[in-house]
Image (cartoon, rainbow, N blue to C red):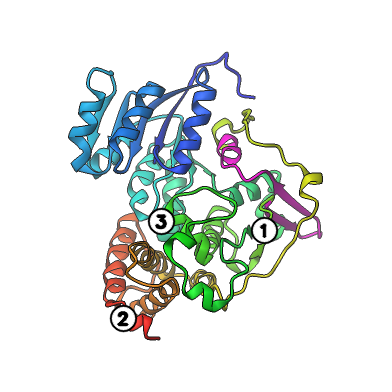
Amino acid sequence: MVSPAGPKRSVTVLGATGSVGGATVDLLERHSDRFEVEALVGGRDAAALAEVAVRLGARRAAIADERQGEELRRLLDGSGVAASAGPQAVVDAAAVPVDWTMAAIAGAAGLAPTVAAVRRGGVVAIATKECLVCAGTAFMAEVAEAGATLLPVDSEHNALLQALGGQGIDAVETMTLTASGGPFRTWDAARIAAARPEDALRHPTWSMGAKITIDSATLMNKGLELIEAHHIFAIAGERLDVVVHPQSAIHGLVTFRDGAVTAGLASPDMRVPIAHTLGHPERLATPAVRLDLVALGQFTFEAPDLARFPCLGLARSALLAGGAAATVLNAANEVAVALFLARRIGFMDIPRIVEATLDLAAGRLPCAAPATVEDAIELDRESRRIASERLPEAQFRAQ
């Protein structure tokens, strides 16, 4: 356990009002004698951000939505918590030197503040997979240049990190990510095509934000995680695999070149991987339910069905293609998921929009991987514009 005798670690939480942020806040409260909160960052919910900032005694709070700035300042008036608003305020909060940062802002919007956190060094616990998907090569170069420590928070990548046991990647033959299969694992293609947002948001295992829950339903989330693993562990895409494991007890497996296999197991509670990064290299206690193998009874595994879940195949193809493909894929997916949640397109229009955007971008956008984070942000912007050109949605529904 992290010793409470030494000085407290300073922390910042980017995405403090989201699901990962909420789990992080819970652990910080449970170990308040070991951590002090420098900054909390939220998206649009001023009331939730202010409440958490006061509860944790944060020095500052920043909200991305500038329109919520006045409300945040009003709520924090007299609390001693400094308030600010707007995208630049978020980046400024992320850039304040601390020992540990949770990077949990969903989507490409998390790229700039996460890079700001990386550039000032320290430990960055990353739950914003889009940083590595949008700008993996450039992002990892930033990590190396700053001498920052990057620790994965996604349960799968955290499990892989622990299963490695300190071994180098040269000792590894393959890495396997597990997927729960999402809410549509047993649905036929026709039923999946007719799925509504409320159907896709009923994840059988995890409680997450809307965007990542939809990605889990399409299996795009698992595809993005393949790209993420490629960058985190510097492993070739051909050595990465996905298996469906409905019990969500095994999160990742490492097969070594001698044939030995190690696996990372835990109950499906995000506080487990978060605590691993928060206490690293030591261990923090969590209230997570302990894994009961007897109660589970059995583990089952299935190959993912790419016919019913084409997003996984699109993501794997983007990973193997390299260059700008992953950036385009992510941008198009974010556009499509937002449209689906707004009930403007159908569920299977998501992969259609992504595939069409990849095809169009191949002739209109740079093919090389973004050399800088700024290049990645610009490529993301252009890819979104191309994805939006694929509307009206009627042309997809007719297919």
Crowding around mark 1 (Cα neighbors within 10 Å: few <14, some 14 to 19, many 20+) is: some
Quarter in which the C terminus is drawn: bottom left
Q: Which mark is residue 138?
A: 3
Name the residue: 75% across, 57% down.
256
The x, y position of residue 132, in whole percent, is: 45, 56
Mark 1 falls on what kind of element? loop
Alpha-carbon distance for marks 1 and 2? 35 Å
Crowding around mark 2 (Cα neighbors within 10 Å: few <14, some 14 to 19, many 20+) is: few
- The three-letter amino acid code for the residue at tag 2 is Ala
Name the residue: 65% across, 48% down.
159
> Circle 1 sits on which residue?
246
Alpha-carbon distance for marks 3 and 1? 35 Å
Picture layout, residue 213 above or below residue 38: below
Q: Would you say residue 263 sits in the magenta stretch?
A: yes
Residue nearest the viewer, comparing 151 with 59: 59
**Does the rendering let one see residue 148?**
no
Alpha-carbon distance for marks 2 and 3? 37 Å
> Circle 2 sits on which residue?
394
